[in-house]
Amino acid sequence: MQLYDLKAGTNPRRLRIFLAEKGISLPVTALDMTKGENRTPEFLGLNPLGTLPVLKLDDGSVLTESIAICRYFEELQPEPNLFGRDALERARIEMWNRRAELELLLPLVQQFVHLSPFWAGRRPQVAEYGTLAREQALKTMAWFDRELAGRPFLAGDRYTVADITAQAALLLGKNTGAPLPEGLPGLARWWAEVSSRPSARA
Ligand SMILES: N[C@@H](CCC(=O)N[C@@H](CS)C(=O)NCC(=O)O)C(=O)O
């Protein structure tokens, strides 16, 4: 097995946190996107999207999409459980993971891509779109704050993959001009908790 990783990438980070929670370590090939290492014909042969993470299995099978890879390892090593134990819990975790992805991670990625000089010349940039995405991310933060006033973690009373997605998203926001605003005590309490887990440094 070989994991292709991008140290600073948000989706690679959520997979690394997930693996750290499971206590799984893998052989890693770290790519440098500033050198175009994720755009070589060889890498595009593994993942035509040129994105990371990518997992290559010993039989040559390739998995991309961080959550697909997480699910694969949840099947191989069910404990500690991060995707849910019964129908209702699995559905609830899926619901919050989707919300964390679509309503928080995606707008935070978009505000980064459309507003940061890092992406100038690498991607088309529309500043107004970036500003709207940043506003949407801030709205989601306020919503999650209200949710987290009533329970310890996003999907209930324990840490799950939904928290990992939101955690990686907020770290991206923090590093790219959309940090957690003041006055969100529920989200701040949750953030302090998730970011003090040993896996947060993965
Ligand atoms: N939906 C994919 C997204 C993967 C993705 O966008 N990865 C980013 C890093 S967070 C990447 O590799 N970007 C490099 C590029 O776009 O050139 C997943 O969850 O794995």
Image (cartoon, helix red, strand yellow):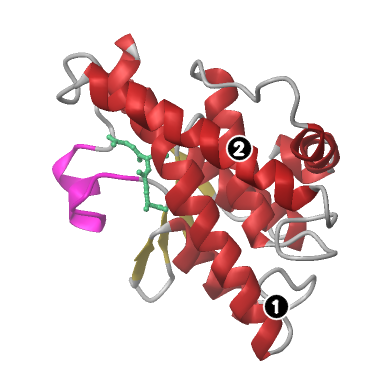
Any magenta on residue 47? yes
Which label lies toward us, 2 or 1? 2
Residue plotted at (85% across, 37% down): 189
Q: Which amino acid does label 2 sit on?
A: Met
- Residue 151: x and y in percent read 84, 57
Circles 2 and 1, Cβ within 8 Å, touching? The answer is: no
Q: Is residue 101 left or right of residue 22?
A: left
The quadrant of the image that shows the C terminus is: top right
| Residue 127 appears in the figure | yes
List x then y, in percent, for residue 81.
75, 73
In the rendered view, would you say 145 is above or below 81?
A: above
The residue drawn where x is 38% and y is 24% is 112
Answer with the quarter of the image where residue 40 lies.
top left
Q: Which mark, by number, is residue 141?
A: 2
Q: Which residue is under mark 1?
A: 84
Q: Give the range drawn in magenta.
A: 39-51
Q: What element carries label 1?
A: loop
Give left or right: position of 35 versus 161. Answer: left
Quadrant in the picture for residue 171: top right
Which of the two labelled residues, at mark 2 and mark 1, occupies the earlier sequence position? Answer: 1
